[in-house]
Amino acid sequence: MSGLAHYLEDEGLATVIVALVREHIVSMRPPRALWVPFELGRPFGAPGNADLQRRVLQASLALLDKAISAPLLEDFNEATLADGGGDGDDNWRFPGALDNSSVLAEAASVVPIWQLACERLGKTSVGISGLAPEAAVEFIERFHSVDPMPNPKGMAQVTRARFSVDDIKAFYFEAALAEGGHPSTQQLHEWFWSGTLAGALLRDFQESTRVSEDKNLRLIASSLVPAERTYWFLNGLEAP
Amino acid sequence: MARLADIPEPERTVIADLDCPLYADTPPVTAVAKALRHVAIVSTAGLIVRGERPMLANETGYRAIAATVGDGDILCSHVSTNFDRTGFQQDLNVMLPRDRLREMEDEGVIGKAADTHYAFMGATSPKKLEDKARELGRSMLALGVNTVVLAPV
């Protein structure tokens, strides 16, 4: 990101970075940066908190009002528990019953809850694999079987597997928020990775890719399960 | 909680050890007055428009996201699984605050919110992005954009 700032400024555009990793800014010295204390993935703060997003955006643009002769880095020190990195919501529960007779049955039981979530959110971020969410689960479940699902045209099989995993996670996480609430990111991940059959499926799939003889499968291994989860699973550790 | 010390291992070490090429200080462009600012957002979240080919690891190109594209048609194809996406799933503005930018235009805080915003694939070596970044810069200037908010994930 800092590299982009250097190139765009050199082309004649005034830039400001909303930075998540302060150390990278210090090292790469872009002209202007506002460091924010939010978790990775949320540079403008909390979902649904327009006021906070606005304050971050205004604070970043305010750096443009300062005459500078050297790189400018300021901190946005307005931490908020509502950014998702806080203690979470003790009252949050997955808003429905999961059929745990099989991973495909579980996915089918998530569908109506996910549909409610889509209505509430007015959108979905599922769809990058090109498969319906239940089909994405089946694509991964049968990937190493003697009867893998046919891979539709337009995307290599391994690439579709990687994006199917993204879709499965989005499908479950969106469903988990069908009734709103403010669970922390860690709460959601603990529920998914330790409490669902889909989470177990993805962990097993990741392990199969990690040790695969197929280089292309090994290349996607690190894009499937968060690194800390992989570390905890491989070392028999529980989430702190 | 993006303080490096709060990020769990092994991701903390990966981030700390990330290749950060050294740059000479770039002379900063003098920003225009607020009322004249024409602002675009450039994300490195690997955002794409639904139906497009997802961006892949180490991809150096960028994608354009027009204002006419609805929030539900913007997907995240970033290669990393080590950042939160549940915020994005609920509200695009945590990654790409285009609604906030439009509000600021409506209120006269800025001159104009760009009609198009852009996304690169983060986690690509910064030096490899130079050609496309400069190409995008020239393209934005041609469209009248003079100010860019850069948004990582």
Image: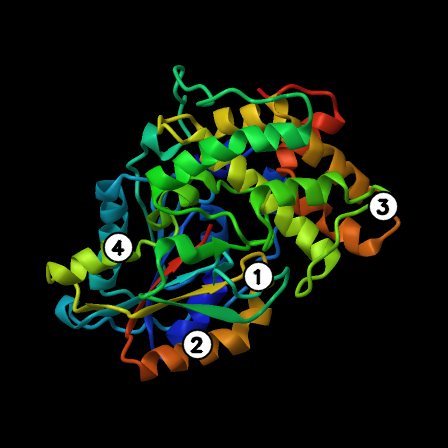
Return the residue at label 3: A212
Position of residue A98 relative to residue A153, above or below, is above
Give me the disc on residue B54: 1
SS at badge 3 = loop
Position of residue B33 relative to residue A63, above or below, is below
Amino acid at pointer 3: Ser
Q: Are marks 2 and 4 in contact (CB under 8 Å)?
A: no
Residue A192 position in % (x across, y down): 57, 28
SS at badge 1 = loop
Q: Nearer the viewer, residue B99 or A176?
A: A176
Q: Residue furthest top?
A: A90
Q: Are marks 3 and 4 in contact (CB under 8 Å)?
A: no
Parent chain of label 1: B
Q: Along the horizontal axis of the image, is A190 left or right of B85?
A: right
Same chain assignment for discs 1 and 4: yes
Amino acid at pointer 2: Leu
Q: Are marks 1 and 2 in contact (CB under 8 Å)?
A: no
Q: CA distance from mark 2 to mark 4?
A: 22 Å
Is residue B24 in sight in this rendering? Answer: no
Q: Residue at x 37, y 49 (%)?
A: B92
